Structure formats: structure tokens, C-alpha cells
Image (spheres, helix red, strand yellow):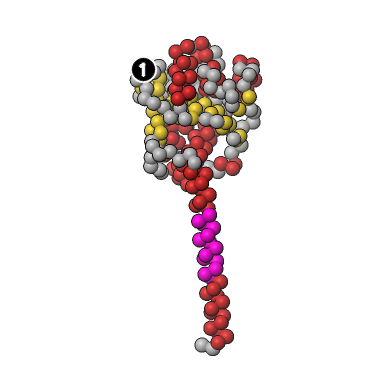
Amino acid sequence: MDNRKINIAAIVLATVLLFSLQACQQNGESAAADSSFASSHLPTDTLNVGFLAINGVYNSELMAPFDVFQHTVFHTTPGMKAFIVSPTHEPIKTFEGIKIIPDFSFEDTPSIDVLVVPSAENNMDTDLQDSVLIEFVREKGTQAKFIMSLCDGAFLLAKASLLDEVKCTTFPSDIGRFKETFPHLNVQEGYSFVHDGKAITSSGGAKSYDPAMYLVEYLYGEKVARGIGGGLVIDWKLEEVKHLR
């Protein structure tokens, strides 16, 4: 092999090595960015996620976030332990007719790190007059690291004075009533969910997956969120979800 051929081979090899090093550096930066998003929030212990389910709870607001949080155990350690809490141990019936046996009652509920309040049929009226229900939400919500509402579950959080100092939202067609009922709140419109402080409020319905997927990414990073999204056939890209934080 003459010197010219040797020089060409050396140039090709150097070019390949340069691109390889750049690719490794970019991958390292990507991994660092992914871990840094959750680094300051990454839980060191299993998080207890308590879902408040009362008679008339809507299937989508209960099942969607429950699915997401329950799936964390397959993608990270420690993950989340999801359970259902109701006023008593008696079975409840969702608005759509599914019967559910609660894991805990108000009397024996363990500590809750993430309190999730799905929407129920009477959240905008008679539930707001239930002092036992509201006091439970106030107590557990005050103690929790995060509180999350789906759809009209925001009315219960507001009644329990848990949204007084934060931006919040609710089901799109109930925004007007939300503002009228709680005129002091900083209510936002046009978002799938709003995260302010420890409160994550959302529009609910088919969008009920969004705030749950977001909290997973916020706590555990994009890789875990994408893994859960793959398992649930959710094409999760936070940047494509209209949200406020």
C-alpha cells in the first residue's frame, strides 16, 4: 500500500472516530438532561398514591391515572403504590355502573404522598356540603407531597382551601361555574393540566392520562414516562401537551 492510500485510510479512520466521539458525547448529554429533569424530585421511597373514589365517580378520571401510576413499578424502583380510598369499606358504584371495592376507608387510610381526586357526579353541588368528605380532602391534601384533580375533582380541592394560592383549572365547560363558585381562585383556561406548587389540576376526560404521565416524568424522568407510555400505547411527548407550569 503506497503512502497516498495509507493517508486516505488514516483520514477515514479519524473521521469515523470523530463522529463516534460526538455521538457518544451527545448521548451522554441527552442522558444527563433526562436525569437532571427528575434529579431534584426523584423519590427515594415508594410513594403512596391515594385515589379518592366516591359513588358516582367517573370511570375515565379514576382509571386513566390509576393505570399510569400503577405501571411505575414495572419501570422504576421505587415506584408508586396506588390504592382506592372511600368513606367506608362498602362497595361504590361509578357513574357508568362499575362496582368497586375500596382498599381503605377514611378511618384506616395510610399516609398519602399523592392525593388524587377524580371527578364524581355531584362534585359541583352536594359533595361540597359533605363536611366529612371535605375535611378528609383538606387533611390528606395538606399532608401530601402532591395533590391532583381530574375534571370537577378540582371543586373538592377548592372547597378544602387547597387551591387558594395557586393557578388551577377544571373541566372546560365547567370553568364558568368554577369561577363563580370560587371567585378568589386564579383559574386558567385552555390547558390539559396546570401544575403550580404541589397542585396539579386538569381538564379530565380523555385528557386524564396527561397529568399522570406528566407527574411520572417530573418525578422519574422521560425514560420512565416513555416506557409507561409504550406499555399503555400512549405516544407521550410532554412538549406536545398544552399545559401550564
| Residue 191, horizontal then vertical, whole percent | 61, 32
Q: Quadrant of residue 207?
A: top right
Q: Residue at x 39, y 26 (%)?
A: 111
**Residue 223 in the image: above or below residue 61:** below
Magenta region, main secondary structure? helix
**Residue 26 in the image: above or below residue 160:** below
| Residue 232, horizontal then vertical, whole percent | 45, 40
The residue type indicated by label 1 comes to Glu
Region in magenta: 16-29
Q: Quadrant of residue 67?
A: top left
Question: Looking at this view, is 43 or 224 the one in front?
Answer: 43
Q: Is residue 14 visible?
A: yes
Residue receiving disc 1: 107
Residue at the bottom extreme, as displayed: 2
Q: Residue at x 59, y 35 (%)?
A: 245
Question: Looking at this view, is 201 or 65 the one in front?
Answer: 201
